[in-house]
Image (spheres, rainbow, N blue to C red):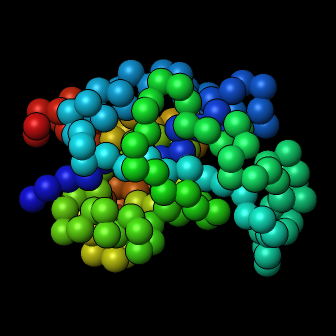
């Protein structure tokens, strides 16, 4: 069975310590994500979290709390960090990146997830894909959360979805190649 690596939201907005959404541990995972990209290329898709043109529903309150993020998709804040040449990229205004475009990219294979943040967009994407019947591997040491406790808790929650979601490490994914 084939695998598709999906690199979730490795963007300036989560990397830059000067932003309100800075993710501690972001820089620490870059080398592991880079090794996964190299090993699984060309079966790699990047995602970007972007703000909607006009928030609706509960998203209005969300962006009232985080108004700095109401910028167009081409704002530098939403760029994938320079460490990566992202290639195919899916933009989404939602935490989960799972949808028809990502489903088409993954096909009948395994969805391998790395990126940020474990306790938000990675978790949301993993659960949505699992609900769709897609086997998911979350690469624990190639993900970072809003803090280490939230990262660990999110990994624990995702492990409860086994065997649909499997929590693995970079070494295990690289050993399969």
Residue at 80% x, 69% y: name it.
Answer: 55
Residue 23 against residue 83 in the figure, above or below: below
Image quadrant in which you'd find residue 34: top left
Instruction: Find residue 146 and report its horizontal and vertical position in percent.
Output: 63, 39
Q: Is residue 152 left or right of residue 33?
A: right
Residue 17 against residue 119 in the figure, above or below: above
Which of these two is toward me, 26 or 151?
26
Instruction: Find residue 73 and report its horizontal and vertical position in percent.
Output: 68, 52
Q: Is residue 148 visible?
A: no
Instruction: Find residue 124 and report its horizontal and vertical position in percent.
Output: 51, 62
Say which quadrant the N terminus sits in: bottom left
Q: Is residue 71 visible?
A: yes
Residue at 45% x, 72% y: name it.
Answer: 99
Image quadrant in which you'd find residue 31: top left
Q: Is residue 137 left or right of residue 88?
A: left
Which of these two is toward me, 117 or 34?
34
Residue at 26% x, 30% y: name it.
Answer: 38
């Amino acid at each position: 069975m084939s695998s598709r690596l999906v690199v979730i939201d490795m963007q300036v907005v989560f990397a830059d310590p000067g932003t309100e959404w800075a993710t501690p541990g972001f820089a620490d995972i870059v080398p592991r994500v880079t090794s996964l990209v190299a090993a699984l290329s060309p079966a790699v898709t990047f995602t970007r979290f972007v703000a909607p043109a006009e928030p609706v529903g509960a998203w209005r309150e969300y962006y009232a709390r985080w108004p700095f993020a109401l910028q167009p998709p081409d704002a530098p804040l939403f760029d994938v960090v320079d460490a990566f040449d992202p290639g195919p990229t899916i933009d989404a205004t939602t935490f989960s990146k799972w949808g028809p475009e990502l489903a088409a990219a993954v096909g009948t294979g395994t969805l391998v997830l790395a990126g940020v943040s474990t306790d938000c967009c990675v978790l949301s994407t993993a659960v949505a894909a699992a609900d769709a019947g897609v086997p998911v591997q979350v690469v624990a040491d190639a993900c970072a959360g809003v803090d280490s406790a939230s990262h660990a808790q999110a990994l624990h929650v995702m492990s409860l979805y086994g065997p649909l979601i499997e929590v693995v490490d970079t070494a295990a994914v690289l050993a399969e190649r």
